[in-house]
Amino acid sequence: MKTLENLLDECNIIEYKERVSEGLYKSISALSNTDGGCILIGVDDNKNVKGIDLSNGSQESIVNKIVDSTGIQPKVNVECIDGKNVLNIIVEKSSIPIAYKNKYYKRVGNTTREANREELRKLLLKDASWDSLTNNFTIDDINVSTVAEFVSLAINKGRLSEEAKTLNVIELLTQLDLIIDGKFTNGAILLFGKNPQSLLPTACIRIGLFKGNDESIILSDKNIVGNLFEQIKGVDLALKMFTNMRAQIKGFQREDIWDYPLTALREAALNAIIHKNYFDYSSAIQIKVFGDNIWFYNSGDLFGGLTIDKLRESHTSKSRNPLIMKIIYMAGYVEQFGTGIRRMIMACLRQGIPAPTFEISQGGFILRMYKQYPSLNERQNNAIKYVVENGYISTKIYQEITGASRTQTRRDILMLCDKNIFMSEGENKELVYKLKIQH
C-alpha cells in the first residue's frame, strides 16, 4: 500500500482533486503545456484521502473524457492509499500545445490559469502551428457546401485529382491533413466550418470607411465572418463597395479602373488571412479605407526569417499557418508561393500609383496603398493617370491637360523621370513619355 509521501517521491508536481470536475481537464492542459505532473483524484486540497468510486466503468469513462476533451492519452493508475482507491493520472509534458474547450492553460506556481498572449506565442515556438492543433468539433460543424466548392476549384486548377469527388468529407480532410488522429484541426474549422467564430471570435475581418483621412469619423463599416472561403468573398465585395471605380472607353471596349488595382487589393487581403497570427486572440484582421490611402493590418510579424527588404524581392514562402496556405493555394486564390507581394507591387505601378508600403508595427504587419504619389503635385499625378489611360504623353499634351507652362512641364517631367516613374522614348518631335515599369 502506498502513501502520499511515496507518490511525492515519484512525481515532482502533484495536484489534488476531490472529485472529477471541469478543473481536472484544465489541469491536464496546464500540466501538458508546462512540465507535466500527476493529478490525484480522491484527495482534497488539504491532502485528506477521500477515495473515489471506480465501480460501473467510471475509470474508463474518465479516461475517455480526457481523451475526447484534450486529445491526449494519459497514463492512469489506481493507487490504494489509507485503504481507499485514488486515481493517479500521470500527465507528461507535451511537444505540442494542448487545449481544453479551445483554450490553452499553463501552470503558474501552484495554480492553473489560461495562457496569455505571450505564453501562447512561446507555445507556438514548439513547432506546432495554430492551424494544425486539434479541437473538439465534429463533422456536424463542417459546411459541406464549402468543401464541395473547394473541391471544384482545386480540380479546375489542376491541384486536386478527380478522385477527390469520390471521397467523403472525413476522407478528404484526412488526406489534406486537416483531420489528425480522427480529430478536426483548427485549420479545418476555420477553412470549412459553419461557425468558425465559436472557435476563435477574432477570426474575422473588420473593414471601415472613413471621412477623408480622419479616423475619428467613420462613414460605414462591416464585420466579415464565416469560414475563410466566405470571408474571401465577403472582403472582395466590401472592398469594391468602399472604393471608387471610373469607367474608361478604349476603342469599343469599356474598362473599369478602381482607386486601387483589384488584384492588389485581393492579394493584400489574402496575405493578411494566410499570415495572421491566430494565436493572438485579441485582434481581427483590419482594413481602413481613407480618402487617399487604404490600410491593412494583421497580427503577427514577418515569419521564417523574412525581412521588409527581402519581402520586395523574389523569396521563398513560409507561413505560420501552412495548412491554411496550402488549401487557399489549391483553391487557386494564390497562383505561386512567394510571388504575391511582387504581383501587388507590379499591379500598382502599372496603374500609375505608388508601390505599397510595408512596416512591422502595433504587434503585426501593416500594408498601405496610396491612390497617387503623395510627393508629386496635382499636375504630375494627372499626367500619370493620362499615361495609364492612353499609353504615353508628350510635352505638348502635358501642357494642354495640366495648363502648365513650358518651364513647369520640363521640370515636372524631369522629376517624374528621376523618380523612375516615366521613361522617354523617341527623339525630337517624336519624343514621348511612358510609365517605367520595373520587371
Image (cartoon, rainbow, N blue to C red):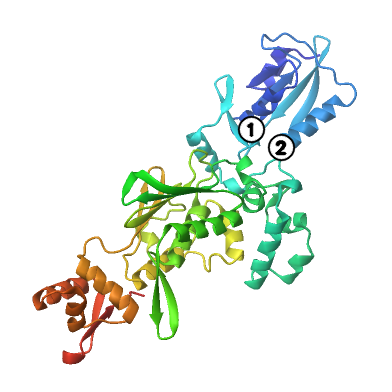
Of residues 78 and 435, the one nearer the viewer is 435
Q: Answer whether labels 1 and 2 touch (C-beta < 8 Å).
A: yes
Under tag 1, what secondary structure?
helix
Q: Classify 10 Å Cα crowding around label 2: few (below 14), some (14-19), many (20 and above).
A: some
Residue lying at 52% horizontally and 39% vertically, measured from the top left: 281
Residue lying at 44% horizontally and 49% vertically, measured from the top left: 220
Residue 415 image offset from top left, x and y in percent: 17, 71
Of residues 88 and 250, the one nearer the viewer is 250
Of residues 200 and 274, the one nearer the viewer is 200
Residue 32: which numbered mark, if any?
A: 1
Under tag 2, what secondary structure?
loop
Quadrant assignment, res 260: bottom left
- Say which amino acid is labelled 1: Ser
Residue 125 image offset from top left, x and y in percent: 52, 43
Is residue 193 in sight in this rendering? yes
Residue indicated by mark 2: 72
**Vertical relation: 168 (above or below) 42:** below
Quadrant that contains the N terminus: top right
For residue 62, side relative to residue 227 (left or right): right
Is residue 421 in sight in this rendering? no
Which residue occupies the extreme left position in the image?
407
C-alpha gap between disc 1 and disc 2: 9 Å
**Vertical relation: 210 (above or below) 155:** above
Quadrant assignment, res 13: top right
